[in-house]
Amino acid sequence: MTVVDTTATTGTAWMLCPLCDTMIYRKRYERASRVCPECDGHGMLTADQRVEQLLDADSARPIATAPTVTDPLGFTDTRAYPERVRQARESTDLPEAIRCVRGTVDGTPIVLAVMDFRFLGGSLGSAVGEAVTAAAEAALADRAPLVLVTASGGARMQEGIVALMQMAKTSRALRRLDDAGVLTISIISDPTYGGVAASFATATDIIVAEPGARLGFAGPRVIRQTIGQTLPEGFQTAEFLLEHGIVDMICHRWALRARLSRLVAMTVRPPLRTEPGDPDALVTDPTALTVGESWDRVRAARRLDRPTTLDYLAGAFDDFV
Ligand SMILES: [Zn+2]
């Protein structure tokens, strides 16, 4: 798996697109929310940029997260794990690989949890698992939609089994939202792998992916070596997964906010129209419906211009995605 961090803002005025290698003007790339003007490739965003892109200005309020065990194994490879965390904090200015906030999208309250790949590959450790759970609990308390933006290489290996346990913990937190009928949406950004792909990223009601985003458990190289077969073209890309029913929709980054706004707005119930004599008033009493003769109904069913599914959708709902 190749991952190129395009979030660095320092350096020269020109840069190479990590996907098509075209020389592009960095300012233009930044203005386009890190979407390449040549190949439309979606580069990596920081958690702060996501929050800014998706929420109404100044509406973000941080969600407090309980402290977790920072180094359960006393893990050291070439460097001690706490040292790696400290460095990640310094370079990203984030306490962990995720940012969780309450906020609004065009006025609709939501809870938003955004992963940041720059922080140890967006890996799922105990602190990230606790943050996702806290976000889910906030969404449950507010009965507001939970929106998760994922970017991760998978479970944080330095925390061993404690990291893997976060898959169960976050899945359980999402299940409680499911039971309570609270909408959950994940936005898959490139790349989303391992324990994150196998837990909260794909355990939501609606799975939206950015174009070209890769989503999978093990990477393609590992799978190829394990099964000894050639993988199909586009394997693990958003487009391939949409075709195979894993992803519900693909949404270009520039359209993401508007799409999210429409999805979450559906959770806010408009007041019922109840004035007497209103022809558009909602009929809730079945006996109030006019029912014709059987033969008339058979003939109506055979009419070529009878309403289609789309006509019913247009008649019944204000919006349909
Ligand atoms: Zn490009």
Image (cartoon, rainbow, N blue to C red):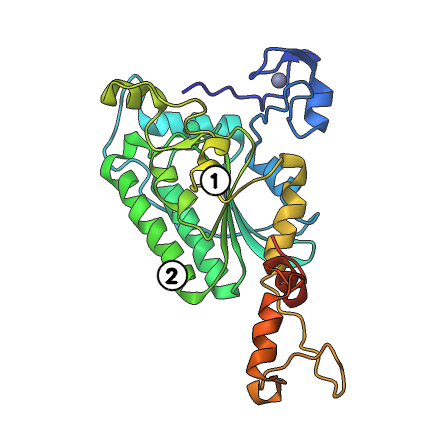
Q: Position of residue 258 (x, y in %)?
A: 67, 46
Residue 10, compared with residue 306, is above or below; it is above
Mark nearest the camera among 2 and 1 is 2
Q: Is residue 216 left or right of residue 11?
A: left
First of labels 2, 1 by sequence position: 1
Residue at image point 43% right, 22% down = 233
- Tell which quarter ligand 1 is in: top right
Task: Examine the rendering and report whether any part of residue 96 can be seen.
Answer: no
According to the picture, the residue beneath numbered tag 2 turns out to be: 176
Q: Where is residue 89? Give x, y as percent.
A: 47, 31
- Residue type, mark 1 in image: Ile
Q: Quadrant of the N terminus?
A: top left
- Dot 2: few (<14), some (14–19), or many (≥20) neighbours within 10 Å? some
Between 85 and 181, the one nearer to me in the picture: 181
Is there CB contact under 8 Å for labels 2 and 1?
no
Image location of residue 301, percent across then percent down: 58, 69
Q: In the rendered view, would you say 241 is above or below 302?
A: above
- The numbered mark at residue 271 is none
Badge 1 local density, few (<14 within 10 Å), some, or many (20+)?
many
Q: Position of residue 59 (x, y in %)?
A: 66, 52
Q: Quick one: SS at disc 2?
A: helix
Q: CA distance from mark 2 to mark 1?
A: 21 Å
Q: Residue at x 39, y 49 (%)?
A: 203
* 135 vs 198, nearest the viewer: 198
Taking depth in this image into account, of 211 and 115 the one nearest to the observer is 211
The numbered disc on residue 98 is: 1
Q: Is residue 313 visible?
A: yes
